[in-house]
Image (cartoon, grey):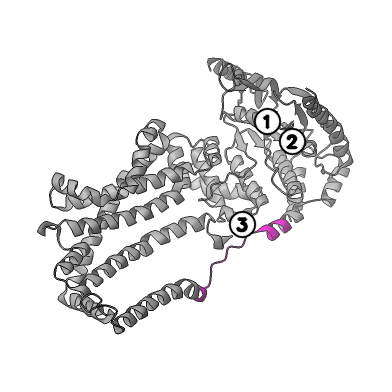
């Protein structure tokens, strides 16, 4: 704990050269003796404004890693610093509160942030129009489609006004066309807001479509296996030839990684 | 419309990071051609869930007509049984005799005071049960030690008819209103507390995680996330708590008799039995039933419907 604090102070002194820094992070679950190592010695920097995709098969501890960065769980070893404060987190499920309208869901986040009452409504409206749901303020969650719910969830995450947005397979449950649209939305909002994004997915094309950097995690335990810089200019399309080519390369690597688990 | 917004925002932000800039003109052109934002509006229109409320005529036919028919049917069968002389007049009074008794009570001016004596006791006791049961349920649901200690007792108390407490309550508290309230509390508090515990147990952990990420922890988490999320189970517990309050009170009134207690519906029923006035007994039973149903229809059913409908949990809203 003290270790984390001193390094946080040191980071802010050098005016945050990163949005998140994971320094030799390991995570094990279970009692000593029957311990299961889930993440092994992960070292990763997310630069301010950078879009990083974490890619891996099941069992690579992607969600555990995001929970650690979000501060919902503590690493067993190593340290994690997020100089921009508590990161915003978006889940695969929209996780909107069904007893509140779309607008009030966002306002609750603003309220928890300490924003005065009279500023909340205009800010919620602004965030809803940012995700192009200007008319949805009074809509109940069950009145929205799956894609609209994820857009409200994105607006709610943005309401935290964090420098770092963590996304845990947020579009995995959506149909392909809706997912395409949301990729566009996310790319647009990312470039408008200067956010850093750490995006977890098992979908290689999605990772290549979105990220500036794709980090491949191995499974059981999760280790950083390889990294690719994606220098295809945005806006990209998921069906672009360049996206497809890199996806093929990364998929090969991912398959090799999965095969390795069947061999012993 | 949306597409010009996007490219406009990009052109107007020349100071952005190099890698983000879509300075490749071909890429911008390609993006415009393939822009998906028109698609987005189409998807929204296709996917939007329309929540309709049933027209009033349909409500009358589907919701009001069936219970009225059932009541009429019971009255008809009752009257037929009287005409067929299934039982003696002293054992089976006719509906009109019961109606006459009702009119007599009304004219004597004590009908409303009888009902009010019971309803005021019942509601006041219920509110007290609410005030005690809610924090109790919260603590049982959230503190493992307390849950292990009194959780099973709380569930067990629900199956103990609270009439069983009447003799003890009379000895401890005497024949006065305290006894009535004690019996109501013992009946309703476990229901309300258990309802809240069940409601909290059924809160999806995802809501709590989402709450923690936005900083709703501790008491703020309980107030803004946990309690609203547990509301459907809590309201079901309140509904059951009211039923238990009312039942306990009627049983207590039947057993305990004292001038201090006033004449409520249960007391009225017992008085009629003592006078072998079968029409009065029938009227007493019907009034107890009627008041129990009325309170449920006026307070608890609308509350439950509102909670469920606002969350899209009713079958019709899908």
Give the SS element for disc 2.
loop
For residue A69, side relative to residue B266 (left or right): right
- Residue B277 part of the magenta-drawn span: no
Q: Mark 1 and mark 2: span between their CA atoms?
A: 9 Å
- Does A65 sit above or below residue B76? above
Camera-side residue of B124 and A256: A256
Q: Mark 3 and mark 2: span between their CA atoms?
A: 33 Å
Say the numbered circle drawn on residue A135: 3
For residue A22, side relative to residue B32 (left or right): left
Camera-side residue of B110 and A9: B110
Q: Image quadrant for the N terminus of chain B?
A: bottom right
Q: Mark 1 and mark 3: span between their CA atoms?
A: 35 Å
Which residue position holds label 1? A62
Which residue position holds label 2? A202
- Does A86 sit above or below residue A135? above
Residue furthest to the bottom: B83
Q: Position of residue A171 (x, y in %)?
A: 70, 43
Could you tell me which residue is drawn at 20 percent across and 66 percent down? B269
Q: Where is residue A229, by image quadrant?
A: top right
Q: Is residue A50 visible?
A: yes
Extent of the magenta region:
B42-58
- Residue B46 part of the magenta-drawn span: yes
Could you tell me which residue is drawn at 60 percent across and 32 percent down? A87
Q: Which of the two marks, 1 or 3, is nearer to us in this view?
A: 1
Q: Is residue B130 visible?
A: no
Could you tell me which residue is drawn at 57 percent across and 52 percent down? A141
Q: Where is residue A14, by image quadrant?
A: top right
Mark 2 crowd level (few <14, some 14–19, many ≥20, 10 Å Cα):
some
Camera-side residue of B164 and A59: B164
Q: What's the chain of the residue with tag 1? A: A
- Does A215 sit above or below residue B175? above
Residue furthest to the left: B259
């Amino acid at each position: 704990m003290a270790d984390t604090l001193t390094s946080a102070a040191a980071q802010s002194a050098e005016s945050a050269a990163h949005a998140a820094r994971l320094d030799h992070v390991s995570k094990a679950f279970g009692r000593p003796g029957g311990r299961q190592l889930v993440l092994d010695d992960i070292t990763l920097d997310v630069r301010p404004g950078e879009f990083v995709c974490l890619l891996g098969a099941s069992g690579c501890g992607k969600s555990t890693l995001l929970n650690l960065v979000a501060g919902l769980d503590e690493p067993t070893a190593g340290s994690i610093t997020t100089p921009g404060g508590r990161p915003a987190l978006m889940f695969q499920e929209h996780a909107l509160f069904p007893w509140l309208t779309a607008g009030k869901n966002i306002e609750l986040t603003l309220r928890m942030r300490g924003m005065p009452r009279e500023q909340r409504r205009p800010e919620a409206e602004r965030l809803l129009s940012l995700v192009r749901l200007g008319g949805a303020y009074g809509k109940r969650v069950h009145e929205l489609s799956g894609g609209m719910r994820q857009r409200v969830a994105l607006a709610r995450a943005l309401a935290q006004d964090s420098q770092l947005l963590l996304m845990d397979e947020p579009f995995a449950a959506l149909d392909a066309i809706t997912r395409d649209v949301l990729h566009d939305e996310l790319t647009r909002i990312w470039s408008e807001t200067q956010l850093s994004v750490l995006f977890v997915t098992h979908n290689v094309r999605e990772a290549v479509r979105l990220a500036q950097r794709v980090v491949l995690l191995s499974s059981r335990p999760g280790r950083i296996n390889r990294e690719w810089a994606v220098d295809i200019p945005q806006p990209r399309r998921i069906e672009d030839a360049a996206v497809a080519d890199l996806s093929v390369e990364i998929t090969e690597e991912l398959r090799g990684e999965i095969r390795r688990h069947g061999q012993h | 419309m949306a597409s010009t917004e996007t490219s406009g925002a990009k052109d107007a932000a020349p100071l952005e990071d190099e890698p983000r800039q879509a300075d490749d003109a071909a890429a911008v052109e390609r993006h415009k051609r393939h822009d998906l934002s028109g698609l987005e509006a189409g998807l929204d229109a296709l996917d939007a869930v329309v929540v309709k409320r049933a027209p009033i005529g349909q409500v009358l036919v589907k919701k009001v007509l069936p219970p009225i028919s059932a009541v009429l049917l019971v009255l008809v069968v009752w009257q037929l049984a009287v005409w067929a002389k299934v039982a003696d007049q002293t054992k089976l009074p006719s509906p009109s005799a019961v109606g006459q008794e009702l009119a007599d009570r009304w004219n004597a001016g004590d009908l409303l005071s009888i009902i009010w004596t019971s309803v005021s006791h019942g509601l006041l006791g219920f509110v007290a049960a609410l005030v005690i049961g809610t924090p109790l349920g919260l603590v049982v649901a959230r503190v493992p030690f307390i849950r292990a200690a009194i959780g099973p007792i709380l569930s067990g108390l629900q199956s103990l008819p609270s009439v069983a407490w009447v003799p003890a309550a009379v000895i401890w508290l005497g024949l006065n209103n305290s006894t009535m309230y004690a019996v109501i509390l013992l009946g309703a508090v476990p229901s309300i507390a258990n309802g809240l515990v069940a409601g909290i147990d059924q809160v999806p952990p995802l809501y709590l995680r989402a709450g923690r990420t936005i900083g709703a922890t501790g008491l703020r988490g309980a107030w803004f996330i946990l309690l609203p999320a547990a509301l459907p189970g809590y309201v079901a517990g309140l509904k059951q708590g009211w039923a238990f309050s009312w039942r306990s009170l009627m049983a207590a009134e039947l057993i305990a008799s004292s001038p201090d207690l006033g004449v409520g519906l249960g007391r009225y029923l017992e008085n009629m039995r003592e006078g072998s006035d079968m029409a009065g007994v029938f009227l007493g039973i019907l009034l107890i039933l009627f008041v129990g149903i009325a309170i449920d229809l006026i307070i608890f059913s609308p509350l439950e419907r509102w909670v469920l409908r606002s969350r899209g949990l009713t079958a019709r809203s899908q």
